[in-house]
Structure formats: structure tokens, C-alpha cells
Image (cartoon, rainbow, N blue to C red):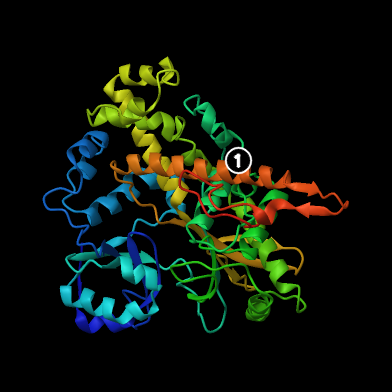
Amino acid sequence: MEKVILEEKDAVDWIYRGEGAANLILAYTGSSPAFIGKVLRIQKSQRNGKSGVKEGRALTTHERLLWRENKELTASSNREILEQLYVKHVMSPLLGPKHVDVGIRVLVTKEFLKSVEKNVNCHRPAWRVHSSQVDVNRDSVLILSDHSIFPDGNLKREPCITVEIKPKCGFLPISRFITEENAVKRNVVRFRMHQALKLHNQEISEYSEYNPLDLFSGSREGIQKAIEALYATPQNNFRVFLNGSIVFGGLGGGTNSTTVQVGEAFEDILKNFIQADNGQRTTSFLQLVAETISTSGALEQLLEVQKLDTYDIEGAIHAYYNIISQPCIVCRELSKDKLSCRYTSLHSIPLDQSLKIVKDYLIAATAKDCSLMISFRPKEDGRLPSHNTVYLGSTNQAFEYKVYFIDLDLKPLKKMEAYYELDKKIVSCYSQMVKTEHETDKAVTINSNGSVRDQRYALEDGLFTEGCTGFRGRAF
């Protein structure tokens, strides 16, 4: 723990950078050498009164059993310490320490946290403000390097551009525990199916063409296709920063498709970074991002960690009920003809095996939800590179780059139940969408006068059932 204590007077130096479900990210704008080039991660609490603070221990009894091999984790007294130790002892060894920043904890006063919340609320998306707030009962926060800049560089003299990507799950599951009704999961990537549910819930306004299988393909063509799709429809999966300030994508929420105006503005932003003619800079920049992903090999390691999920949630959920010593609700819901021995056999395995199945699943879940930060700065002649270098052939430029994984949060054991329920909703909604599209394709008839009548616009609401109603007439 650092001896520095952040007080109310220090709050003005920290500005809103973004947020996820559990944390706010603030960037430093002051002059203290200790914090230049740093960001602050503050935990949030829900406005329903539930706080993230836990007295005594950060893990439940069953979670301590799950992580018993790491004594530091099981002895953690609060969630902040636990999260940092999880990154240090679990995720960093798996992903490689050169791509993971463990960070340090710094003490804060309650007045500092209250002042921060007052300062940043006007910059947060309204739905985030409505659902969560700064957890002012914390006594420390996490300080991390600002991966959107090169701290050893002169920002006024040489630009630094950073891309933040949420890769999502990069493989198709092959688990034998996937039911026949859910067999579509073996052929359609999770991100694509989840888009249907998000569209229905109005979390997004249009469908993204991004396919994580392209990004994780290992081929330059596939990676390039993925980056172009992310740029076309960023949602909350693609953002760009210039010298630490966001210049493309959404703050904490998400954005729709990239309009001509947005594209032109981004093209102009790149003029001091990419040495290409107007109209070609964005294309060259996306090539740079794709080339760097291919060269760095970081996603190969991430995919290996994601693939620790070998049972899929449909198998791992049974192991979860073994651990908490409760009757398996999933088995109870399955009819006798569907309750095959492959599911009942999971309830006869040793406890150690159940623990391994669930622990691997939760580690994989962290890897599926994390973000990738890739920062670039032009390589200067005569300066010894302090980072890896990538060459952009289309502009004959060399760039130094660095790659880091962020948002490596520990998933609570209790979330296994939510993962199972979400999986059911995603598959059901996608399956209903496909079924409806098939029915609408057949709804084109020939009238008696020989004219073609398209029945699609006569379809009634309610074709989508099981939590996915109201897609009528929606192009997908």
C-alpha cells in the first residue's frame, strides 16, 4: 500500500475516462510525478443499496474452497485487494506479465470519493448514473498505468494513438454437454447470437457484422476483416484515444454505426499520425491495427485462456451445484428423456474435479470479457526503441507499440447461475429470430392477378417467444 492518501482537494485532477459494470476509470490531469501517466480505478455500488464492500472476507465460503490453492486470495479482507491479487496470481501468469499491469493500491478519503462522483456524473451515460454510483465506503483505489499514452514520451511533440478492443469469445464450443436444442452454439459464434438479444432489449440499435472468429483466426485477412467491422459498428467494442483523450467510440456506453461525418472527422484526426493522402489515412490506420495484432501474438494467448472453458456453461453448471451442495435445478428442469447419463454422471465426479471445472470456467469468463489496449507512436530516427516495432508498408512508416489486457475482473461464483440463464435467453432469442426469418422468406405469395405479394409486413407481433418478442419487420 502506498503512503500517499488522496484527499478531497485532489479530486479535481482526475477526469472521467470510462466505466464498466463494476468500476469507474479516471485519468490524471495534474502535475504530481507520482500520478502522471496513470489512471484510477474506483469500484462502484448499485443504487439499490447493495454495496461491493464485504466485511471480514472478500470471498464466500464456497469461493474460498474454489480458490483454496492461493492462500493470499482466500485471506483477502476486501474486494479491492482480492481483485488485484487475482490479476497478479491468476491472470498475469496465464496471459503473460508483459501484457498485464497489476497496479498498486492507494489510500483515499471518503471526501475524495464523494467529490469525484460529483465531478464525473455529468460525463457518465445517463443509464449508468441511474443504475450505479461511486462506492464511497472504500478506503483505497487501484492505480494503473494509462495504456492510452507512452509515459516516457512528449505528448505535445509526438502523438500517441491507442485502440481499445473488446475481443469477446473467439471460439465455437464443442462440449458434449450442449443439448441438441442448443446445437446452434456449435456453429454460430456467441457474439453474433447475443446481438439478437441486445437488439431486442434495445441495448443496440443495429446488428454488428463483427465476428470474433475473424479476429482470432490468426490470418491477416481475417484480422483485417474483423477490425474493419469493429470500425464500421463500434458499439462498446472499439474505441480510439489520441494522447489519452477519446476521439472515436463511446464513453462508457456505446455508439452505433460510423457515419460519414464521424468517418471524416476521424480521418482528419489521423493527419498528423498517418502519412497518407486524405481519404486513405483511416484505411492505413486499420491496417496498422490488424498488422500489430497479428505480429504481437497477444490474442493467441488470450484464446488459450478462453479455451479453459471445455465444458460450456451447460456442463459447468452441474459442477457448480456440486460445489454449493444444493440440488441441481438444471437436472430438475430437464425432462426425463433429456436427462441423459452424461448429465447425471457429472454429479458423481469427485469434488476436486468439480472445483477445477468451475474455476476454469470462471477464469475463461474473465478472458472472454476483458479488453485489449494497443498503443502506437511514430518511431523517431536515432531513438532507440523502448518497445516493440511494427512497420506499415502502405505509408512506409515504423511505429513503436505496446499491448496490454485490462478489465481482468474476478467473476463471482454465484454468477454461474446468471451465466446459465443468460445462455438460455441468448440461444432462445437467436433461434426464434432464425425461425421467423425463415417464415418470412416463405411469406412471399403470388396473387391471382399475377402480382407478387410480400407477406412479411403482415406478420403479427408474437412470432418471437420465450423472451424475444417484438422483432416484427426488423432487418437482421
Question: In this view, which residue lies farthest toward the front?
Answer: 448
Nearest to the observer: residue 371 or residue 144: 371
Residue 29 picture location, percent across and down: 38, 81
| Residue corresponding to mark 1 | 188
Residue 130 picture location, percent across and down: 32, 70
Q: Is 129 rendered above or below residue 355?
A: below
Circle 1 crowding by C-alpha within 10 Å: few under 14, some 14–19, many from 20: some
Residue 31 picture location, percent across and down: 34, 83
Q: In which quadrant of the rendered image does the N terminus lie?
A: bottom left
Q: Is 422 rendered above or below residue 118?
A: above
Q: Left or right of 80: which side holds 157?
A: right
Question: In this view, which residue lies farthest toward the left?
Answer: 56
Q: Label 1's element?
A: loop
Q: Left or right of 416: which side holds 114?
A: left
Q: In which quadrant of the rendered image does the C terminus lie?
A: bottom right
Nearest to the observer: residue 464 or residue 382: 464
- The residue at 36%/64% (across/down) is 144
Report whether residue 320 is seen.
Answer: yes
Nearest to the observer: residue 51 or residue 339: 339
- The residue at 50%/24% (across/down) is 176
Q: Label 1 amino acid?
A: Val
